[in-house]
């Protein structure tokens, strides 16, 4: 275009003449007002586009827990995860986990001594197929898990739909699982547990820097919920759970970090009620390193049929008091059903080596104590419980 | 829309491109039918029809409310020069070139009291034009808003290469498929009629938007003097300081409103555009060009203010 040269020549002159040519640019009031208009920018929260790249990642997770003077379970689980885009609008995800578990089974009440040993191996796999549309995505997932005494099959369908301005995304999901339980002690044979669940949620961009999420999940379970390896354990064959989750992610513009906070409410028909608050701070140190310190607090109210270590005077331990005269229908000494509080401290460190490769390290320290329950009232006679979790992962885009 | 409109999409399968283009066009149509003052069922026509009546207040939906807020901001930030009630002055001016005629002063004087954002009752939810005969219109930012909405929809649908052009108000979606920027020609304000598309400059952009206001879109010539359609709301008379103003910015709605305000600002235009931190190309009454390129205009996604901050640190 011949006239372009004219423009360039004129520019040189203008540079000399423009009165404010050296003034650093500012952002004006109109610029800010324009950005406030709805739907003129693609929201950073947009979550529904099909992945462009595939990712394959391998992770090795180590878990170890302990109680005073007793090293308990060690779990080492390698896992493989693949995400592959297919033909633009589709993606398939698959993962495979193998856990090798060894160690002493949990020692619950302090007064029970002598831990039995256990060895186990679990293989789990799941496949998820997702179809992406303009403003929506639908996913179908199948999961399978197998231990020698426990087999589980689950299917789930979830969908999401975003508003035209992408500031709101509605999410819904349903799922069902069928478990077969065949404990080695043959206390029961071919027992089943069937669970169906439904979830509704909404993700809302509150501002350019704030994203909120609310999810409500209802789970209806029927079947065998007992721990077959506990002599004294009898639980209802119905377990319904209600879970509410609120998340708030806030991007702090001044230092380009993100604060992720969440609150989770859990309640079930066993009488267990729990609250979890969690805080994560995603700090990009530079373009390659991201460190994310994490903290979490959990507090739980015990199940109605959980019993404290007060045993029957006639037949003694491990039977609950009154067992010989008026045996209760339901009873359990499983510490997971007790009243307690727990705290987790951890950190994740991610290193993006180049455009294709990244490595992450994660370490978490978990501690559970009955005295840490919010407002007191933790179950008496419960040993403190500690667990450590470490993970190293490699991923590569393709 | 009464202007040439163009949507270009590259880098997607042809079947998707058709569907995506239709998606963008339907969004443009939606905005046009909602805000056109030529359609009796539009929100704007409803507001105008109620002007001056005792029950003039009309409750607005959130999208309209945000556009009205934006218009209020333009009025304030332009020192009252950008006034979305000034369209009523068109009753005095006839820009049909075969019968060039200046308005008589009495007509103009009778219309000026109907111009003024200060005569609009706007509480954030309900709007009322307090004087009978007042008119509201979204000229200067309505079409540009449609450009932005259509572009954002395409971007959200995954389009990485394309552009939306509604009558010269353009926003691009990333570079061309081969990675090079789009070259947007700036029409020569004095191009002869037989060569109306002649350009006097070309601007390369890979991100953001460009919009141009000029004295050549609609005008009349009386006694050798040009009178264009951009009218000063205080006097009712056309502006004459600039032949054309092109503004590059992250959003089309921004570029469009700033280019119109710059035309109205006359000799204050450069200072004004500098204060908004955008790039521009001005052609003055003698055809001389003033041009300035800033990083901010090339950085629509993140934040114009972030690039500005970086720039400040370097200094």
Image (tube, coloured by chain):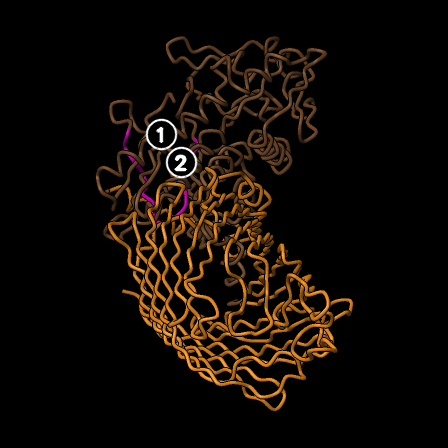
Location of residue B247 by image quarter: top left
Location of residue A339 by image quarter: bottom right
Mark 1 falls on what kind of element?
helix
The reply to whether dot 1 and dot 2 touch (C-beta < 8 Å) is yes
- Asked if residue A387 lies left or right of residue A351, the reply is right
Q: Decide: is B7 above or below A104.
A: above
Q: Which chain is orange?
A: A
**Residue receiving disc 2:** B150
Q: Which mark is residue A142?
A: none
- Asked if residue A158 lies left or right of residue A254, the reply is left
- Quarter of the image where the C terminus of chain A is located: bottom left
Please name the residue shown 59% across and 15% down the image: B48
- Quarter of the image where the N terminus of chain A is located: top left
Question: What kind of secondary structure does the magenta stretch mostly adopt?
Answer: strand
Magenta run includes residue A66: no
Along the viewing direction, whichever of A223 and B259 lies nearer the viewer: A223
Please name the residue shown 56% across and 79% down the image: A106
Q: Decide: is A69 above or below A227.
A: below
Along the viewing direction, whichever of A80 and A86 lies nearer the viewer: A80
Along the viewing direction, whichever of A321 and B211 lies nearer the viewer: A321
Mark 2 falls on what kind of element?
helix
Mark 1 or mark 2, earlier in chain: 1
Q: Which chain is brown?
A: B
Q: Position of residue B300 (x, y in %)?
A: 45, 49
**Residue receiving disc 1:** B25
Q: Position of residue B291 (x, y in %)?
A: 42, 46
Q: The magenta stretch spans which residues?
A: B197-213
Label 1: chain letter: B
Looking at the image, the residue that sits furthest to the left is B14
Label 2: chain letter: B
């Amino acid at each position: 275009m011949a006239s372009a040269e004219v423009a360039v020549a004129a520019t040189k002159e203008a540079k000399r003449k423009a009165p404010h040519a050296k003034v650093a640019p500012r952002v004006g009031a109109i610029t800010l007002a324009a950005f406030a208009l709805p739907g003129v920018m693609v929201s950073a929260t947009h979550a529904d586009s099909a992945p462009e790249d595939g990712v394959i990642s391998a992770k090795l997770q180590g878990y170890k827990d302990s109680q005073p003077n007793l090293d308990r379970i060690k779990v080492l689980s390698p896992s493989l995860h693949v995400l592959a885009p297919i033909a633009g609008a589709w993606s398939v995800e698959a993962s495979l986990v193998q856990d090798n578990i060894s160690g002493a089974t949990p020692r619950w009440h302090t007064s029970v001594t002598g831990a039995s040993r256990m060895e186990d191996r679990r293989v789990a796999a799941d496949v998820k197929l997702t179809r992406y549309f303009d403003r929506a995505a639908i996913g179908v997932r199948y999961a399978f898990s197998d231990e020698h005494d426990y087999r589980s099959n689950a299917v789930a369908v979830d969908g999401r739909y975003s508003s035209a301005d992408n500031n709101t995304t509605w999410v819904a999901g349903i799922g069902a699982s069928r478990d077969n339980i065949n404990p080695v002690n043959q206390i029961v044979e071919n027992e089943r547990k069937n669970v169906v669940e439904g979830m509704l949620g909404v993700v809302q961009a509150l501002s350019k820097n704030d994203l909120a999420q609310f999810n409500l999940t209802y789970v209806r379970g029927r079947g065998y919920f007992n721990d077959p390896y506990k002599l004294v354990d009898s639980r209802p064959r119905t377990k319904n759970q209600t879970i509410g989750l609120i998340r708030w992610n806030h991007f702090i513009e001044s230092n380009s970090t993100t604060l992720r906070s969440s609150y989770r409410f859990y309640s079930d028909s066993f009488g267990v009620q729990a609250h979890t608050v969690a805080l994560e701070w995603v700090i990009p140190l530079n373009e390659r390193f991201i460190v994310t310190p994490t903290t979490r607090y959990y507090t739980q109210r015990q199940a109605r049929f959980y019993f404290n270590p007060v045993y029957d005077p006639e037949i003694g331990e491990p039977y609950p008091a009154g067992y010989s005269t008026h045996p209760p229908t339901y009873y359990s000494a499983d510490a997971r059903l007790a009243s307690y509080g727990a705290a987790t401290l951890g950190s994740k460190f991610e290193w993006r080596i180049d455009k294709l490769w990244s490595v992450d390290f994660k370490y978490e320290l978990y501690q559970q104590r009955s005295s840490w329950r919010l407002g007191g009232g933790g179950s008496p006679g419960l040993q403190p419980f500690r667990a450590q979790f470490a993970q190293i992962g490699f991923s590569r885009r393709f | 829309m009464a202007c040439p409109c163009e949507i270009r999409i590259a880098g997607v399968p042809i079947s998707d491109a058709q569907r995506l283009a239709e998606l963008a066009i339907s969004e443009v149509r939606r905005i046009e039918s909602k805000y056109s003052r030529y359609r009796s069922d539009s929100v704007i026509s409803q507001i105008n029809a109620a002007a001056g009546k005792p029950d003039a207040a009309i409750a607005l939906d959130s999208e309209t409310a945000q556009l009205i807020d934006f218009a209020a901001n333009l009025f304030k930030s332009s020192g009252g020069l950008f006034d979305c009630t000034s369209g009523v002055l068109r009753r005095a001016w006839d820009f049909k070139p075969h019968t060039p005629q200046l308005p008589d002063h009495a007509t103009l004087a009778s219309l000026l009291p109907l111009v003024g954002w200060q005569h609009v009752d706007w509480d954030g939810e309900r709007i009322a034009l307090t004087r009978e005969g007042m008119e509201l219109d979204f000229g200067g930012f309505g079409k540009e808003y449609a450009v932005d909405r259509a572009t954002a929809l395409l971007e959200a649908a995954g389009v990485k290469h394309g552009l939306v052009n509604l009558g010269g108000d353009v926003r691009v979606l990333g570079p061309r498929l081969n990675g090079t920027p789009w070259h947007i020609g700036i029409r020569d304000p004095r191009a002869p009629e037989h060569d109306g598309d002649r350009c006097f400059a070309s601007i390369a952009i890979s991100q953001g938007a460009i919009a141009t206001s000029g004295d050549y879109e609609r005008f009349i010539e009386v006694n050798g003097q040009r009178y264009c359609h951009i009218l000063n709301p205080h006097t009712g008379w056309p502006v004459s300081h600039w032949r054309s103003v092109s503004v590059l910015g992250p959003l089309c709605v921004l570029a469009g409103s700033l280019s119109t305000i710059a035309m109205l600002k006359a000799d204050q235009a450069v200072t004004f555009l500098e204060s908004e931190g955008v790039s521009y190309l001005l052609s003055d009454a003698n055809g001389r060009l003033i041009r300035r390129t800033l990083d901010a205009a090339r950085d629509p996604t993140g934040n114009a203010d972030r690039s500005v901050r970086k720039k400040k640190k370097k200094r």
